[in-house]
Image: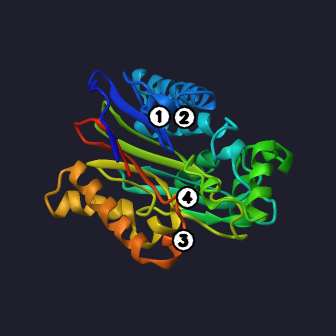
């Protein structure tokens, strides 16, 4: 397990972005081990730093944490290297079904979409659900119809937009019985931020699992499972979405912090231990050698941290 705690900067707020094993925060480099900073990993680090810069710029200009996390995640969704937006993986039928959630910690409200297939930036769609509907979670065709009914609607994109060679190869390998460890995609993207108003926000976006069943929804779309924020902390998770759903990981971390007196670091480590113990004893997880947990968290009046197991 590795833990990275970025430097502190109280001048205008803090922002962090992550994808899988990678974390970037203002004033720090990506926390990938040196041996992994080769080839595509260098490009991934650059993309993360670029997304972080965009989110940090929002905060520098006095913007809200909610706008900062959305801007960072949008940038990652536009990059084919990540399993979100443009780079989303394919389900078993060769289709893309995307999901995303954004959480406003100060107002305790959220917006989520899932199983959308013609939305360029699902995180933007999630924001629309939160602010322009009376609901918190809209799925599939209903979400698509809602978005197209908005006055300032975005043009839908066709399946060719998500058609990347690398994802087709991964689906083919999966369907042909390829190594399961190569078909786990912790490149789910996430961001957390704290602005100068001391307001926290979290956001996450993903394409899910390679070769997943049609209609499968993961933890990214569920507040309390893969993403969470309130007035004290914000959390974004990446890893095995089904484990996060069964354990409501993000909510349990918050509960340990708020009600059991755990520090944020202790709460994250405790939940990691519980999840790993569960996976050792559960036949579904024990058959999957690639189980991992990555948590990006930020605390009120503190630093952005990354916990990985």
Question: In the image, residue 142 lies at what x, y percent?
Answer: 70, 66
First reached walking from the N terminus: tag 1 or tag 3: 1
First reached walking from the N terminus: tag 1 or tag 4: 1
- Which label number is shown at residue 112? 4
Label 1: how many residues lie within 10 Å, few (<14), some (14-19) or many (20+)?
many
**Which of the pair 200/175 is nearer the observer?**
175
Query: Is 154 placed left or right of 244 in the picture?
Result: right
Label 4: how many residues lie within 10 Å, few (<14), some (14-19) or many (20+)?
many
Which residue is located at x 68 percent, y 45 percent? 85
In three-dimensional space, the C-alpha distance between marks 1 and 4, rounded to whole angstroms, equals 17 Å
Question: Is residue 143 shown to the viewer in this render?
Answer: yes
Above/below status of 71 relative to 20: above
Query: Is 110 placed left or right of 117 in the picture?
Result: left
- Which label number is shown at residue 287? 3
Above/below status of 66 relative to 285: above
First reached walking from the N terminus: tag 2 or tag 4: 2
In three-dimensional space, the C-alpha distance between marks 3 and 4, rounded to whole angstroms, equals 30 Å
């Amino acid at each position: 397990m590795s833990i990275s705690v970025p430097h502190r900067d109280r001048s205008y707020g803090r922002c962090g972005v992550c994808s899988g094993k990678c974390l970037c925060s203002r004033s720090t480099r990506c926390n990938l081990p040196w041996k992994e900073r080769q080839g595509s990993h260098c490009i991934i680090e650059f993309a993360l730093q670029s997304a972080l810069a965009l989110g940090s710029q929002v905060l520098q200009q006095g913007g809200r944490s909610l706008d900062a996390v959305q801007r960072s995640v949008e940038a990652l969704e536009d990059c084919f290297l990540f399993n979100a937006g443009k780079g989303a993986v394919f389900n078993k039928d060769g289709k893309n079904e995307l999901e995303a959630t954004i959480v406003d910690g100060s107002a305790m409200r959220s917006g989520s979409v899932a199983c959308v297939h013609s939305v360029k930036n699902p995180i933007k769609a999630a924001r629309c659900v939160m602010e322009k509907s009376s609901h918190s979670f809209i799925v599939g065709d209903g979400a698509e119809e809602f978005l197209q009914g908005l006055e300032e609607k975005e043009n839908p994109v066709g399946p060719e937009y998500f058609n990347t060679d690398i994802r087709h190869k991964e689906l083919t390998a999966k369907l042909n019985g390829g190594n399961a460890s190569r078909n786990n995609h912790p490149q789910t993207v996430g961001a957390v931020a704290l602005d100068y108003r001391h307001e926290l926000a979290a956001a996450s976006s993903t394409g899910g699992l390679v070769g997943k069943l049609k209609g499968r929804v993961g933890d990214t779309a569920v507040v309390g499972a893969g993403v969470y924020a309130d007035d004290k902390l914000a959390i974004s998770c990446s890893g095995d979405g089904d484990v996060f759903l069964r354990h409501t990981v993000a909510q349990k971390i918050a509960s340990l912090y708020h009600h059991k007196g755990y520090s944020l670091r202790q709460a994250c480590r405790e939940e990691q231990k519980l999840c790993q113990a569960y996976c050792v004893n559960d036949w579904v997880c024990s058959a999957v050698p690639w189980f991992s947990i990555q948590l990006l968290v930020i605390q009120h009046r503190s630093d952005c941290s990354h916990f990985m197991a």
